[in-house]
Image (cartoon, rainbow, N blue to C red):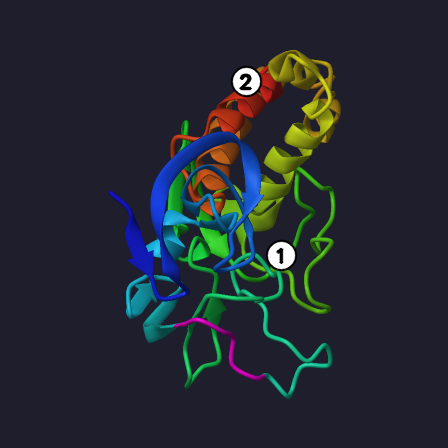
Amino acid sequence: MGKIHPSHADHELELKSFEKPYTCDGCKEPGFGSRYRCELCNFDLHKDCMFASPTTHHDFFRNSTLKFLFQPPEYRSCEEGRRYCDACGKPIKGFVYHDEKKGWDLHPCCRNLPSKLRVDDVKFDLCEKVLSKCLWCNKKKREGTVSGVRGWTYVSKCKKHHFHVNCATEMALEGWDKGTYNEDYSLALQKVELPIQRHNRNQRSGNKFIRMVKVFFKTIAAILLGDPTITLTCLLVELVAK
């Protein structure tokens, strides 16, 4: 049975699942796997956009309440003339959780990012300031983010491992793009050498490191793409582990 959403009141949306990426018509961010969809209008919503709560909280913003909005509020103090997500650093184009007093913003899927994460035997914390380069993109500032905004980064307790939140999504979608025109998508992925593999090619601890990266990206990409059962992510992290 379908469900009505205020942003698409003319038709019911039904839960669907396809192994291909899509753009959510709510937050305008990438998604993969299950989504709420209107076939007549080619309209899709992340589950988190479909069932957004009126208000939410995040451990990163202590004592703060963020209110759900269908459109981002005006932001006159930004040179680009638009708001950005404090988690991933990407511009806000649609649905958003916003704190009026502090000016903080989160995409609906980004609000699910845990403030602490344990991967294998490595503990990670969400951080705002980045002192080292991301081990995926090899940069401090993530490309495609608003000028001067890096977004959140997961940093290990030992300070050796830094990962941009947004890199997990880009990594998954890059894998899809490389396999789009190949009949066997998993085979296409296996032929791709990822930067993280080149980075650790000659290190003795590479296998353990890659295993940790495998679980990390599987977890974060599933959250950001709106589907914890994402098949694409599983395929991709299997590639990373090889």
Looking at the rendered structure, the secondary structure element under dot 1 is: loop
Name the spot of residue 183 as percent of width and height, x first.
67, 13
State which quarter of the image contains the N terminus.
Answer: top left
Q: Are circles 2 and 1 on residues that touch, CB within 8 Å?
A: no
Residue at x-position 39% and y-position 42%: 117
Q: How dense is the environment of label 2, judged by Cα within 10 Å: few (below 14), some, or many (20 and up)?
A: some
Residue at x-position 62% and y-position 65%: 91
Front position in the image: 16 or 115: 16
Residue 217 versus residue 72 in the image, above or below: above
Name the spot of residue 61 as percent of width and height, x first.
39, 69
Residue 78 versus residue 6 in the image, above or below: below
Tell me where the magenta segment starts and ends, as one range. 69-74
Name the spot of residue 60 as percent of width and height, x first.
40, 63
Amino acid type of the residue tagged 2 in the rendering: Glu
In the image, is residue 197 part of the stretch drawn in magenta? no
State which quarter of the image contains the C terminus.
Answer: top right
Query: Which residue in the structure is indicated by mark 2?
Result: 238
